[in-house]
Amino acid sequence: MAGYPVWNQEAARSIIAGLAHLEGATLPILHALQDEFGHVDPQAVPLIAEALNLSRAEVHGAITFYHDFRTAPPPRRVIKLCRAEACQSLGCEAMVEELAETHGIVVDGEPAGDAVVETVYCLGNCALGPSALVDGELIGRVDAARIAGLCQQERAQS
Ligand code: FES
């Protein structure tokens, strides 16, 4: 999965400088930073405050007010786990429990390392369930160990 570059304070500074002249520049700057890095790092707050002559609290307030902005990098791997009826009859709920209890991976919870596991309802692969979509690739007959492995693989690569 194509990731974002790591946060770079100098690159952030030049993005901010390029937009600081705009009227109401806070939001365009925040969007530009998120487009570039996938999130608005807390290190951006003093840079934006200084460039726009705002207080840090004002900048922080704008970031938290608009729910679109992330302050941490997005997960690099997204695993969508089917929990619809056919996959339920093939054991997906037991797998969700095993993921939590054995591997500490909470479906629809906090990211596991750089991966996140989310619920979806039917991936059109019912006969081969439990099914999952991993970075857009459909996988059938998954089990908890495989999902945990996919999370760890991402952790190891990052
Ligand atoms: S119910 Fe899971 S793929 Fe259809």
Image (tube, helix red, strand yellow):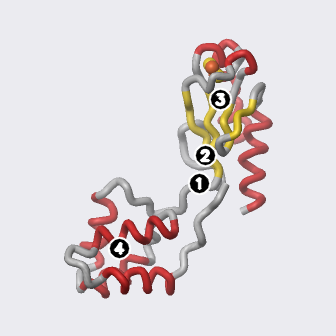
Q: Which residue is label 2 attached to?
A: 116
Give the position of the C terminus as an image quadrant. bottom right
- Distance Cα–Cα, label 4 vs label 3: 40 Å
Residue 27 locus on image (x, y percent): 29, 68
Residue 1 locus on image (x, y percent): 67, 54
Q: Which amino acid does label 4 sit on?
A: Ile
Residue depicted at x 52% and y 68%: 37
Q: What residue type is labelled 2?
A: Val
Q: Nearer the viewer, mark 4 or mark 3?
A: 4
Q: Nearer the viewer, mark 2 or mark 3?
A: 2
- Distance Cα–Cα, label 4 vs label 2: 27 Å
Q: Say which mark, if any, is on residue 29.
A: 4
- Distance Cα–Cα, label 1 vs label 2: 6 Å
Q: Is residue 125 above or below residue 1?
A: above
Residue depicted at x 76% and y 60%: 157
Q: What residue type is labelled 3?
A: Val
Tell which quarter ligand 1 is in. Answer: top right
Question: CB atoms at circles 1 and 2 under 8 Å apart?
Answer: yes
Query: Element at badge 4?
Result: helix
Q: Which residue is label 1 attached to?
A: 75
> Looking at the image, is mark 1 or mark 3 earlier in the sequence?
1
Q: Is residue 36 left or right of residue 117?
A: left
> Looking at the image, is mark 4 or mark 2 earlier in the sequence?
4
Q: Say which mark, if any, is on residue 96.
A: 3
Query: Element at badge 1?
Result: loop
Q: Nearer the viewer, mark 1 or mark 3?
A: 1
Question: CB atoms at circles 4 and 2 under 8 Å apart?
Answer: no
Q: Which amino acid does label 1 sit on?
A: Pro
Crowding at mark 3 (Cα within 10 Å: few <14, some 14-19, many 20+)? many
Crowding at mark 4 (Cα within 10 Å: few <14, some 14-19, many 20+)? many
